[in-house]
Image (cartoon, helix red, strand yellow):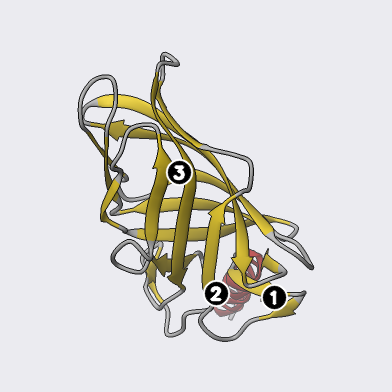
Amino acid sequence: MKYLKMLGLAAVAAMALMAVTAGSASATTLEIGGVTQNASVTITASLKAGTSAILKDTAGISSNTCTASHVHGSTTSADRAGVTVDNAYTGDSLTGPLTPGAGGLSFSGCAREPVTADATGELHITWTSGTNGTVTSSGAEVTTGSPFGTLNCKTNAGTHLGTLTGVAAGNATMDINAVLSCSGISSKWEATYSVTTPSGLGVEN
């Protein structure tokens, strides 16, 4: 009986631990104007007015500068951190494939033209704190001119791009400060995007 009682107590302790662990796991959900979303969210962002997207090698030598850039895509169901979800609005992180073609990822007004998005890839948003999140990319591929000749820049799975700063009203901001591999050259991509759609985009846990 004593042995069975000990087994029972161990089982209760195990279930309590599982409950605490499950309760402490964070999730990522988008909100619009402070309202939690329960459907796919379409995000459109453009380079913030008066700023430029800058690509330079890690030694600080400029490769290219663009005065306009556009990003467009919608969150979708996907495997996130090895867990299959059955919706496009909540999970360990949110995946948003960018629309194929120039409509999903484009650059213009560049010092060295053209800059071509050969593959748009996906953006992944993960909640961090408040209404903010981190942004990573996978599967994107861009060809650009540079002083070193034509460069092919790619994002591998989980390439850190930067941060998304959410707002209750107006335009959220996506700050890019990424290190990319461009034809074997380690390069930095810096840019600030303003999220024009939806207005009041935020990230919640």
- In percent of width and height, residue 152 lies at 22, 38
Depicted 3 relative to depicted 141: above or below: below
- In percent of width and height, residue 22 lies at 59, 70
**Residue at the spot of label 3:** 160
Real-space Cα separation, disc 3 to disc 1, in angstroms: 24 Å
The one nearer the camera, 48 or 38, is: 48
- In percent of width and height, residue 24 lies at 65, 64
The answer to whether mark 2 and mark 1 are in CB contact below 8 A is no
Q: Residues within 10 Å of mark 2 (few under 14, many from 20)?
A: few
- Counting residues from the start of the chain, the first of labels 2 and 1 encountered is 2
Real-space Cα separation, disc 2 to disc 1, in angstroms: 48 Å
- The secondary element bearing badge 1 is classed as strand
Depicted 177 relative to depicted 205: above or below: above
Q: Decide if residue 205 is in sight here.
A: no
Q: How many marks?
A: 3
Q: Which residue sits at x=54%, y=86%?
A: 39
Q: Quadrant of the C terminus?
A: bottom right
**Residue at the spot of label 2:** 7
Real-space Cα separation, disc 2 to disc 3, in angstroms: 46 Å
**Residue at the spot of label 1:** 32
